Image (cartoon, helix red, strand yellow):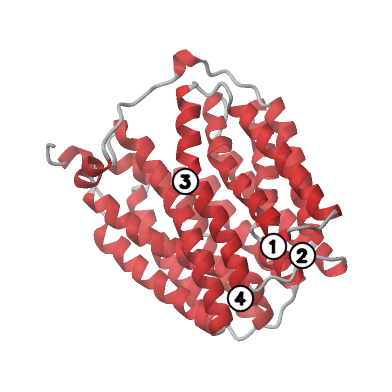
Amino acid sequence: MKRPTILYSLLQSFFWSVWAALFGFSSTYLLAAGLSSFRIGIVMGVCSLVSAVLQPVLAGWMDRTAHRYLKTGIVLFSLVSIAVCFVMLFWQVMPGILFGLCAGLLQMMAPLVNALAADNPDTDFGISRGIGSLGYAVVFPLIGIFTARWKADAAVAAAAAGFAGTILMTCLFPVTRTAGNTVSAAPQHSSSFVRRYRSFMLVLAGVLLLYISHVFLGNYGYQIVQHKGGDSVAYGNGGSIAALFELPTMFLFARLLRFRPASFWVRITGISFFLKALTIFLAHGMGGYYAAMAFQLSGWGMIQVASVYYVNEVIAPEDTVRGQSLFTSALALATVIGSFAGGWLLDRFSVPALTGIAALLAAVGAVIVFLCMRTDHDHQQRPAD
């Protein structure tokens, strides 16, 4: 394995360990801080909405400046986040606002961290992203243990440590890209894009429903585990199992493409999202909950890599940047909707209502993806504008 891949793999590992702390244990921390499930939804929804609005602006500016400030942006966001974490740990003021700020900054960093891989051709993104999930799998149960033995502040401390590691690996990562290597595509009007890629946009609508189901089960996983009879340790174990099941797909997806195109595997993800949600809904204890995590193999773990290849299959080269960004925007929008709606469902109804609606949304999303998916190249057959 080449040095850039090793350093970038460590960067991904630290970055996703922060994700495990802030998003995996958001309910644990905020419930302990005195917030209701609905207010937790507001906190996570607002931070996702703000990041969804600012991400395209930030990404566009980074592209226009030929990524000269890419590493600076990652380091700056990490430093601010560490400062916020220290305020939460030692002063414990405005926990909801500060936690939301930290989570929002993390989401803002996501496209920057992903873009950094392209600045060195010796970086293998697939392997690095897989090791990032491995880091998530290792850290998640540890946070659960620390939270059970001490208190929910363990998640914030883990996030601060992860941000520090992210800074270190970002500084060490060798960048070889220059302004001359930057390729700029001509901007396209949104209406023109939608007309030319109607089937893609329909598939994206189905994916949005799958993502909302995923947010329901992820952001409120702690409450679900409590309902099934578990605690923070059991919740951490579940997150670790889920992350481990993602690894084979990420490491071996290139081989899967030899048998079927990416569009086929995106269809499979829809079925897996539904089966996971249904299994959690029907589970009477932690055994069934743990069993549901196996669907990460062909669900969440697969769609993270399959979606990238799928966009390249059905979208013309000059439109792929927009196509990729739409998948990212769908996840951000799903986080907003899922955070608000999930918190309301828990406060107004119950955990079974939340998991039942998650299964229903995943079922509808899977049907839309399956029926609207095209296996050919949309841009080769699109009508002229």
Q: Which mark is residue 144?
A: 2
User: Image point 73% across, 42% down: which residue?
Assistant: 163
Asked if residue 241 is positioned above or below residue 385 in the image, the reply reads below
The Cα atoms of the two marked residues, 2 and 1, are separated by: 8 Å
- Residue positioned most to the front: 94
The Cα atoms of the two marked residues, 3 and 1, are separated by: 24 Å
User: Image point 46% across, 60% down: which residue?
Assistant: 334
Which comes sooner in the sequence, label 4 or label 1? 1
Residue type at numbered disc 4 = Tyr
Residue type at numbered disc 1 = Phe
Closer to the eye: label 2 or 3: 3
Asked if residue 87 is positioned above or below residue 69 in the image, the reply reads below
Q: Quadrant of residue 33?
A: bottom right
Q: Which residue is mark 1?
A: 25
Asked if residue 379 is positioned above or below residue 154 in the image, the reply reads above
Q: Are marks 2 and 1 in contact (CB under 8 Å)?
A: yes
Q: Are marks 4 and 2 in contact (CB under 8 Å)?
A: no
Where is the N terminus found, in terms of image quarters? top right
Q: Which mark is residue 289?
A: 4
Residue type at numbered disc 3 = Val
247 or 282: which is nearer to us? 282
Closer to the eye: label 2 or 1: 1
Residue type at numbered disc 2 = Gly
Q: Which mark is residue 62?
A: none
